Amino acid sequence: MYYKLYASYGVLAHEKQPVFSDSASASEAYSVITVDIPDEYALSENCAGETLIEIDGKTHLLRDVLTNVGDDPYLMWYDGKRTHSVELITV
């Protein structure tokens, strides 16, 4: 499923890397990208309008599992035993 993310630049302590989020940045230095989230991860929304993602039967806020590895967006979570990561392909 395609989903729109925001790549913010110049974020303190991340000046040389983009920081990905699911909402527009307060700064003017960002770009909008579209990523392909694998169909095995269901997206929904809570009553506050925040995006939720279901991973391995547990629901997380998308912003809590969204990160970057280098310049690429990733989903990363800990299941109690080990850390998992999935690269999000930019469309």
Image (tube, rainbow, N blue to C red):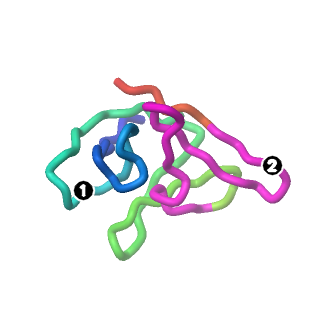
Relative placement, left or right, of 20 versus 85 is left
In terms of secondary structure, what is the magenta stretch mainly? strand
Is 90 rendered above or below residue 79?
A: above
Q: How many marks are shown on the rendered structure?
A: 2
Instruction: Give residue 47's quadrant in the image.
Output: bottom left
Q: Residue at x 45, y 58 (%)?
A: 63
Residue 81: % across, % down: 85, 53
Residue 32: % across, % down: 23, 39
Closer to the camera in the image, 82 or 38: 82
Q: Quadrant of the N terminus?
A: top left
What's the amino acid at mark 2? Arg
Closer to the camera in the image, 91 or 27: 27
Q: Which structural element holds mark 2?
A: loop
Residue at which label 2 appears: 82
Write the start and end of the magenta stretch as one range. Answer: 59-85
What's the amino acid at mark 1? Ser
77 part of magenta stretch = yes
Residue at which label 1 appears: 25
Q: Residue at x 70, y 50 (%)?
A: 56
